Image (cartoon, helix red, strand yellow):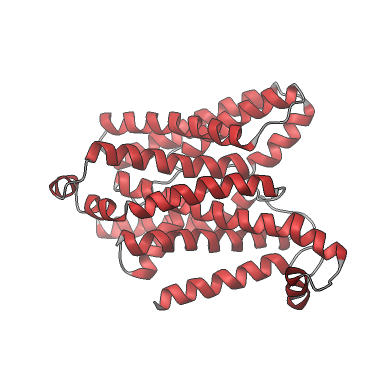
């Protein structure tokens, strides 16, 4: 309960700070006036509704999605360093989205956000398929991580080739997107993000009992009546879908999927999915809100890529996990 209250307090603080702080400061009093429709500055109204609200909601939903995706992958592979970025799933999604973007931008066509999510999902599933294949061949978790990193590099290299042959306008768009950012999110994007992320997150929460059984071993889960084959397929699809949605709209974001689930479990002192799943989502939202705020404000008016900030905070956590694992080993 204490951790939940702290998380909830941090969440509301970061939401308020993300709405208030920017090139134009908007005071809390004015925010409430604008929300209630009692006057307020017209410029502030435009900034609030067209820029800051969609961006803040995107950070909340996509941060939560990335954290949940990481939690599912860590459960699936029984590895604390498994995550969409490390296993190359984000890179596979990035490759597919880059291909679609170059194809449509070169023909001066607008691409619907649903198409981007579908492309990212296909790319993510392709990478996930490779990692699963490797997991059948090599049983060592360290080799599995290496194979994930390698598929990530291969996908990134192919993405670079695609970008090389794209026209100048496409390169600018692709470069900004590939660095990872919540900026430029529109309400139309939020609608798609909300449908995909909320649906997938509810399904993950409904799987709390089978996940809890699976954490105690496959044979135990089977004895508890869990259909292991169907369960594993569902975990793969949901984790890929959540990761693909993030990549399609915000680009590849590193370390959130590894760091947040681990931190949440450390704070809660439990691995019970019924508690960990909603807290993972909340933790991911807080983490991305904080990182996005830092990316926007530290060197304002220059904006950092969200991945640079998440890596700076998330990488030490991963090093800590490795050292802890080594200590126990």
Picture quarter containing residue 328?
bottom left
Say whether residue 293 is visible: yes
Q: Nearer the viewer, residue 157 or 95?
A: 95
Q: Nearer the viewer, residue 201 or 217?
A: 201
Residue 50 position, x and y percent, is 76, 55
Q: Quadrant of the C terminus?
A: bottom left
Say whether residue 255 is visible: no
Residue at 32% of width from left, 59% of height from top?
Answer: 273
Residue 231 position, x and y percent, is 28, 41
Asked if residue 122 is positioned above or below residue 202 in the image, the reply reads: above
Identity of the residue furthest to the front in this view: 37
Q: Nearer the viewer, residue 54 or 2?
A: 54
Residue 243 position, x and y percent, is 49, 43
Q: Is residue 75 left or right of residue 300?
A: left
Q: How many marks?
A: 0
Q: Quadrant of the N terminus?
A: bottom left
Residue at 46% of width from left, 54% of height from top?
Answer: 67
Picture quarter containing residue 275?
bottom left
Picture quarter containing residue 322?
bottom left
Residue 138 position, x and y percent, is 27, 32
Q: Nearer the viewer, residue 303 or 14?
A: 14
Q: Is residue 38 left or right of residue 157?
A: right
Asked if residue 105 is positioned above or below residue 300 in the image, the reply reads: above
Residue at 50% of width from left, 58% of height from top?
Answer: 284
């Amino acid at each position: 309960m204490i951790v939940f209250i702290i998380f909830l307090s941090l969440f509301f603080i970061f939401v308020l700070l993300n709405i208030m702080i920017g090139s134009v400061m908007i005071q809390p009093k004015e925010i409430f006036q604008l929300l209630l429709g009692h006057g307020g500055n017209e410029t502030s109204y435009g900034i609030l509704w067209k820029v800051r609200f969609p961006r803040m909601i995107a950070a909340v939903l996509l941060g939560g999605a990335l954290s949940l995706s990481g939690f599912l992958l860590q459960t699936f592979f029984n590895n604390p360093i498994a995550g969409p970025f490390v296993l190359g799933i984000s890179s596979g999604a990035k490759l597919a989205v880059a291909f679609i973007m170059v194809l449509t931008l070169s023909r001066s066509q607008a691409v619907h956000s649903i198409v981007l999510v579908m492309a990212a999902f296909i790319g993510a599933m392709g990478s996930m398929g490779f990692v699963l294949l490797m997991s059948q061949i090599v049983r060592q978790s360290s080799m599995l991580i290496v194979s994930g990193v390698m598929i990530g590099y291969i996908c990134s290299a192919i993405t670079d080739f695609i970008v090389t042959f794209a026209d100048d306008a496409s390169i600018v768009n692709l470069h900004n997107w590939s660095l990872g950012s919540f900026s430029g999110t529109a309400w139309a994007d939020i609608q798609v993000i909300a449908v995909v992320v909320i649906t997938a997150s509810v399904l993950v929460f409904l799987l709390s009992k089978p996940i809890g059984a699976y954490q105690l071993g496959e044979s135990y889960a089977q004895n508890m009546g869990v259909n292991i084959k169907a369960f594993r397929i569902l975990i793969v699809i949901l984790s890929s879908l959540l990761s693909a949605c993030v990549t399609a709209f915000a680009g590849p974001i590193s370390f959130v999927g590894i760091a947040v689930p681990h931190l949440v479990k450390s704070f809660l002192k439990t691995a019970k999915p019924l508690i960990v799943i909603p807290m993972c989502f909340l933790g991911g939202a807080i983490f991305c809100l904080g990182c996005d705020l830092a990316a926007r404000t530290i060197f304002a008016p220059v904006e950092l890529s969200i991945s640079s900030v998440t890596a700076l905070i998330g990488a030490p956590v991963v090093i800590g996990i490795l050292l802890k694992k080594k200590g126990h080993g």
